[in-house]
Amino acid sequence: MSTVPLHAAPAAAPSTRGQINGILFVALFAGAVTSIASLPSVAALGLSPLIVGIVAGAIYGNVLRDGMPASWAAGVNFSARKLLRIAVAFFGLRVSLQEIAQVGLPGLAESLLIVVSTLVLGTWAGIKLMKLDRDTALLTAAGSAICGAAAVLAFESTLQSKPHKSAMAVGSVVLFGTLSMFLYPALVRAGWLHLDTVGAGLFFGGTIHEVAQVVGAASNVSPEATHIATIVKMTRVMLLVPVLLAVGVWVNRSALNAAAAAGAHRDAHSGAHRTAPRKLAVPWFALGFLLCVGLNSVHVLPAAATHTLNLLDTFALTMAMTALGMETRVAQIREAGPRALLTGLVLYAWLFVGGLGITWAVQRLFG
């Protein structure tokens, strides 16, 4: 009888060792990605380590994946799922309520209007016009509406969607966010966008996808515009929490409705009636995000500790994005890629035209 655990232990050990090896492999890969992203030529394009990570991971996953032991896949999956949730929670240390208060009602109004309108338009256009599935449409809309790749990661965890859908959404962020970073300052300097310093800060922070892209674009206007744009952008990041909670409730309600419809269909044929309880799809890491915002707002942690945690968090997010790239297959992207990019294009047009309108309206209302 004592032989059973002796046989069971060796079976469990390789699995654990393989998972650890997979995590270490992703970490080493993310370290190389971070070095690449820090190169001046790459940084000048506004490409954060997260974006470089998913591209490099996808290249590896489609070209060299056979070189990785199968037992390491568990570590890659851990990085793309559980580590992701932890990293998104600690992303809240980049935001403080005091910073959001600095831009006051204009910044909050700009962020709210942009986020809500872009999410609604992107989901509708993706599903109804481009015939995308719900998850791909939501991920693309979230990346444009809130905070680029970080929002895609957060939504991917909440929706529990496939990695290739996140890759398509990130592709939209890369393309249109980079275009904005170069185009917007050029239009301001040429006098084609009639925006003062405050207006430029509101517009850039309210419409450009990634935090790094916002800073890169606004720094070509003025330091004052950069300060305002960064705070407005972080206000959009703050809205990630209520949006994720709302999406979690919506996803759960949709699943319950689908289950009820399926049950009614079975009942019509069998006469049986059973209801299965379902867990509420609440993204608990969003509450962790909110807790980190609170900690950052009351200055419990020393500035050096916060800076170190932010660096570690960026690395963890890079690991998660790299792992998602490794799990992505080109064939899956090819199926819906053009339609996802067209959805991103629709949102980009809205962010430019609608964003200008919202910026002018907010300045007139609160100015």
Image (tube, rainbow, N blue to C red):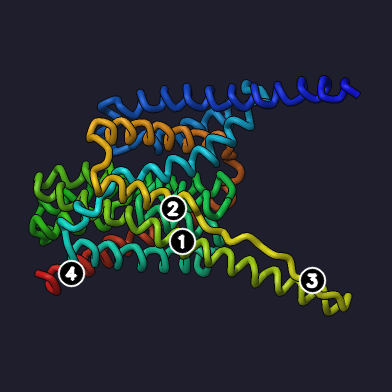
| Disc nearer the start of the sequence (2/3) | 3
Inter-mark Cα distance, 2 to 3:
33 Å
Please provide percent x and percent y for residue 240: 38, 56
Q: What amino acid type should be assigned to the residue bearing mark 2? A: Ala
Dot 4 corresponds to which residue?
362
| Disc nearer the start of the sequence (1/3) | 1
Q: What amino acid type should be assigned to the residue bearing mark 1? A: Leu
| Disc nearer the start of the sequence (4/2) | 2
Residue appearing at x 21%, y 64% in the figure? 356
Dot 1 corresponds to which residue?
245
| Disc nearer the start of the sequence (4/1) | 1
Taking the image as shown, residue 30 lies to the left or right of residue 45, namely right
| Disc nearer the start of the sequence (2/1) | 1
Circle 1 crowding by C-alpha within 10 Å: few under 14, some 14–19, many from 20: some
Asked whether the viewer can see residue 66, the reply is no
Inter-mark Cα distance, 1 to 3:
28 Å
Circle 4 crowding by C-alpha within 10 Å: few under 14, some 14–19, many from 20: many
| Label at residue 286 | 2
6 or 347, which lies in front?
Answer: 6
Residue 293's place in the image compared with 45, above or below, is below
Asked whether the viewer can see residue 16, the reply is yes
124 or 16, which lies in front?
Answer: 16
| Disc nearer the start of the sequence (4/3) | 3
* Rendering quarter of residue 353: bottom left
| Label at residue 274 | 3
Q: Dot 2: what SS?
A: helix
